[in-house]
Image (tube, rainbow, N blue to C red):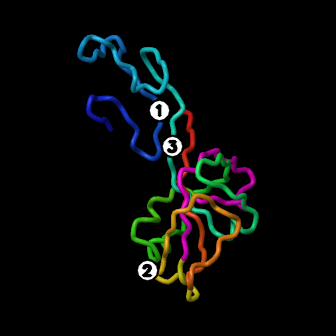
Amino acid sequence: MRRSGGHPIAYARMIFCSTTLPSLSSHREPGGQGSAAWLPSAVHDGPLWHACRVQIGVWMDGWQMECCGTPFRRGSEVAWQLRPATNLAWLDRVLPPGVAATIDAIEDHHGDPDTPPTPATVVSIATVHCRFAPEPVAGSGLMTRVDAAERWSGDVGDRRFAGFLVRVNTAETA
């Protein structure tokens, strides 16, 4: 996508950063000055390969944190084993529709030991509580933004703690 002025900006959650830039000398702002202020760093004409910041949504089951998780907070640097987001349709039953579609991965302490950890920076955290009878009860979900994810999270009334919805920034190198 492009914002006004024609400069490329990444809006997608997953992007590959291979861009061919026009000569900087051919781009002139009014007044005759070349402008490269929008670039992430000094670059040369031609192909541009650089690290891109990618924001993803991660689901962390409450039992994963309680078992062997490490507390984290907004701004924390983490390295998590992630697997593809599957079997999360229940979130759309207990929370507003579309929530599951915002989740790109599941943090899994007990997954494939050969899966390399994904380094990331925590952007936001929300706890998810809902009623169970014995399955999650439709429409009973409660999301609460928090600054930190502790190892033990209490219940809220008759809603049991289910897990964390976490937004993280990762660095992908193209």
List x then y, in percent, for residue 61. Answer: 62, 67
Q: What is the secondary structure assignment of the residue under circle 2?
A: loop
Q: How packed is label 1: few (under 14 Cα within 10 Å), some, or many (20 or more)?
A: some
Label 1 sits on residue? 17
Q: Does the magenta stretch include residue 74?
A: no
Amino acid at circle 1:
Cys
Q: Which mark is residue 54?
A: 3
Query: Residue 47 at what x, y percent from top left?
Result: 45, 21
Taking depth in this image into account, of 155 and 3 the one nearest to the observer is: 155
CA gap between label 3 and label 2 equals: 31 Å
Mark 3 surroundings within 10 Å by alpha-carbon count, few (fewer than 14), some (14 through 19), many (20 or more): some
| Magenta stretch bounds | 106-129
Position of the N terminus, as image quadrant, is: top left
Image vertical order of residue 152 relative to residue 167, above or below: below
Left or right: 49 in relation to 4 = right
Front-lying residue, 31 or 25: 31
Say above or below: 12 vs 135: above
Describe residue 50's horizontal placement relative to residue 120 as left or right: left
| Residue 132 x, y percent position in the rendering | 56, 84
Spot the residue most to the front.
147
Disc 3 residue type? Val
Nearest to N terminus: mark 1 or mark 3: 1
Relative to 103, does residue 62 appear above or below in the rendering? below
Residue 120, horizontal then vertical, whole percent: 61, 45
Q: Is residue 107 magenta?
A: yes
Nearest to the eye among marks 1 and 2: give it: 2
Left or right of 25 in this view: 123: right
Q: What element carries label 1?
A: loop
Mark 2 sits on what residue? 139
Q: Which residue lies furthest to the left in this view?
A: 30
3 or 2: tag closer to the N-terminus: 3
Compared across the picture, whether 46 is left or right of 61 comes to left
